[in-house]
Amino acid sequence: MTLRSVERSELAREAVAAARAGGEVARRGFAAAKSAAHHKGAVDLVTETDLAVEALIRERLTATTGLPVVGEERGRSGAEGGATWIVDPIDGTTNFAHRHPHFAVSIGLVDAADEPVLGVVYAPFADELFWTDGDGAWLGDAALAPIRPVRLSESLLATGFPYDRQTNPDNNTDLATAFLMRTHGVRRMGAAALDLAWVAAGRIDGFWEPRLKPWDVAAGVALVRAVGGEVVDYRGERHRIDAPSLVAAHGALLAEMLDVVREVRYRWEVDLPTTRATDE
């Protein structure tokens, strides 16, 4: 299914309305979030509010657009193939569960080739709505400017760390240290969708993270590309929503970031002890 510009614009309006409605549910659930949190993994949380927001968004988008939905908490509803909504009801659930207000509702739409074609990232407590219909990008009603070039040595970057960081040695700490020493700073804010939206808005210059999920990135990737930014994987190939790694920035900065990724990951792979089988 190839979406025409007018179709994308109409779908973006529906996604904006759904994100705002979901954000209102998130605001109401915020005070009780910590007591309602459950563990999906050692440090991977889900709250009753995640489930309520996803249910509302799923119902609204299904009713208004008829397109299938893939959500973080409840998986797919609707047929395979064609354009599909990708929903993270609360990106930054750990923040939310600890009553830290930096979190967002994220709604992306991918086409039949799984390419993000529009996206909405709504931060309820800041009441900031970042959105793109594929033909432009906005913060509320204000158009976002094209992404600006900046050198790595003068950049402010953001990242995150995977949920299995306590047990998996490939946990992003080496890359974080390397970038910290080469930039003005590295921020870890705990919501990948907002990090990507902030790259699109020029608040941070670049973002990288391993092992993100499609619902973490679909909307944000659309936003970054809508303002002329590039999003690739650690190999430098065009990012797909199921890719195991992500780097987003202006092309010139992105090239410098990839040089660091290659350097550090090569050293990490060389230094990693070899696991040998035993006779036990």
Image (cartoon, grey):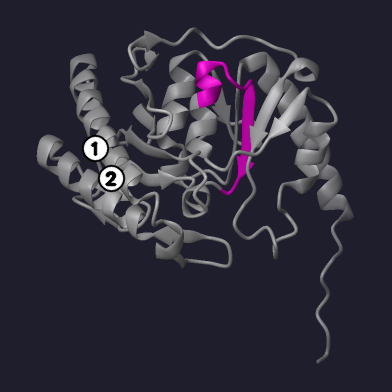
Q: Residues within 10 Å of mark 2 (few under 14, many from 20)?
A: some
Q: Is residue 189 left or right of residue 144?
A: right
Residue 84 in view (yes/no):
yes
Q: Which residue is mark 2?
A: 25
The location of residue 137, given as percent across then percent down, is: 39, 15
Q: CA distance from mark 1 to mark 2?
A: 7 Å
Q: Residue at 64% x, 20% y: name it.
A: 205
Q: Amino acid at mark 2?
A: Val
Q: Is residue 186 above or below residue 98?
A: above
Q: Is residue 178 above or below residue 252?
A: below
Foreground: 128 or 204?
128
User: For the view shown, which residue lies furthest in the bottom direction?
Assistant: 280
Residue 272 colored in magenta in the image: no
- List the residue tagged with mark 1: 21
Q: Quadrant of residue 131?
A: top left
The answer to whether residue 2 shows anywhere in this view is no
Left/right of residue 272 with respect to residue 103 in the rendered view = right
Instruction: List x then y, in percent, for residue 189.
Output: 60, 38
Secondary structure category for the residue under label 2: helix
Q: Secondary structure at mark 1?
A: helix
Q: Which residues are magenta?
A: 198-211
Q: Cβ–Cβ below 8 Å for labels 1 and 2?
A: yes
Q: Quadrant of the C terminus?
A: bottom right
Which residue: 59% across, 31% down?
237
Q: Is residue 204 magenta?
A: yes
